[in-house]
Amino acid sequence: MFNINERLKLVASYVNYKRLADIGSDHAYLPIYLAKNKKINFAIAGEVVDGPHKSSIKNVTDNNLENVVYCRKGSGLEVISLDDNIEVITICGMGGKLISDILESGKDKLINKPQLILQPNVASNLVREKLEKLNYSIIEENIIEEDGHIYEIIVAQYGKMKLTELEKEFGKFLPISKSDVFIKKWTLEIEKINYIISQLKKSNNVDENKILFLENRINIIKKMI
Ligand SMILES: C[S@@+](CC[C@H](N)C(=O)[O-])C[C@H]1O[C@@H](n2cnc3c(N)ncnc32)[C@H](O)[C@@H]1O
């Protein structure tokens, strides 16, 4: 049996189309797992760095999936050709800024309107902001904790969406479902901010405005959890 971590399994559970492009595919674990479980019948495993690209090729070959998973070296969505008829793109395990930059610079590859499954490690607000700009609408969100890290998963399909500033930061659906992991993420954030406030208060030149700003942020977070 080919196993992957819980984070990627959760991403895999949202893949409901047969033709996938996994960008930043590292070991190609996600496309291999999906191919072995017959959830996809064609995948591009895109990777910009030589070492991970080679390890993708090795893993695909070891699993006899050369006719299903095609490892292509290149940056972002440039590894996709429109003829590939990609139906779903996954971009996981990167910062939100990098994911949104990849979407922006590759937006000409989105004209077939593939579904997007994005898993930013940090700065998910930038991903939501970019989705709104690219005329993508969030249809599902999830949040998971694994090995001491908390990850958000955002599923989007082509279509208009207008997010509030709070939805960009906290999510469109996450604050509604208010899972334990969501509450944990933002409780930890409050603790971090409280620590910063305590340090600021120790300064000889106390920055009252900064403290007020941070206290206000804590109040906003408390209302969301
Ligand atoms: C931390 S790994 C995550 C691997 C896998 N997607 C996962 O979630 O476990 C991020 C991978 O993205 C690759 N990467 C970074 N920028 C990229 C880009 N512009 N295009 C393609 N791959 C990129 C890195 O080389 C690295 O292998």
Image (cartoon, rainbow, N blue to C red):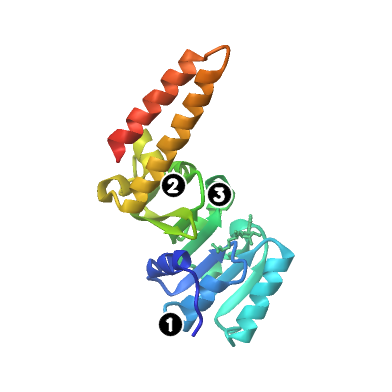
Picture coordinates of residue 98 (x, y %)?
A: 58, 48
Q: Secondary structure at mark 2?
A: helix
Kind of residue indicated by mark 1: Lys
Q: Residue furthest right?
A: 50
Q: Is residue 132 above or below residue 180?
A: above
220 to the left or right of 107: left
178 to the left or right of 78: left
Tell which of 116 and 58 is nearer to you.
58
> What distance separates the C-alpha of mark 3 from that of mark 2?
15 Å
Mark 1 sits on what residue? 38
> What distance separates the C-alpha of mark 1 from that of mark 3?
29 Å
Pair 1/2: label in front = 1
**Residue sitting at 28 percent across and 48 percent down?**
178
Picture coordinates of residue 131 (x, y %)?
A: 44, 47
> What distance separates the C-alpha of mark 1 from that of mark 2?
29 Å
10 to the left or right of 51: left
Q: In the rendering, which numbered label is found on residue 131?
A: 2
Q: Quadrant of residue 58?
A: bottom right
Kind of residue indicated by mark 2: Leu
Q: Is residue 173 above or below residue 147?
A: above
Tell which of 96 and 110 is nearer to you.
96
**Residue sitting at 65 percent across and 69 percent down?**
72
Q: Residue furthest top?
A: 205
Q: Residue furthest front?
A: 202
Mark 3 sits on what residue? 95
**Ligand 1: does it lie within 8 Å of the C-beta at label 3?**
no
Q: How many marks?
A: 3
Q: Residue furthest left?
A: 176
State which image quarter holds ligand 1. bottom right
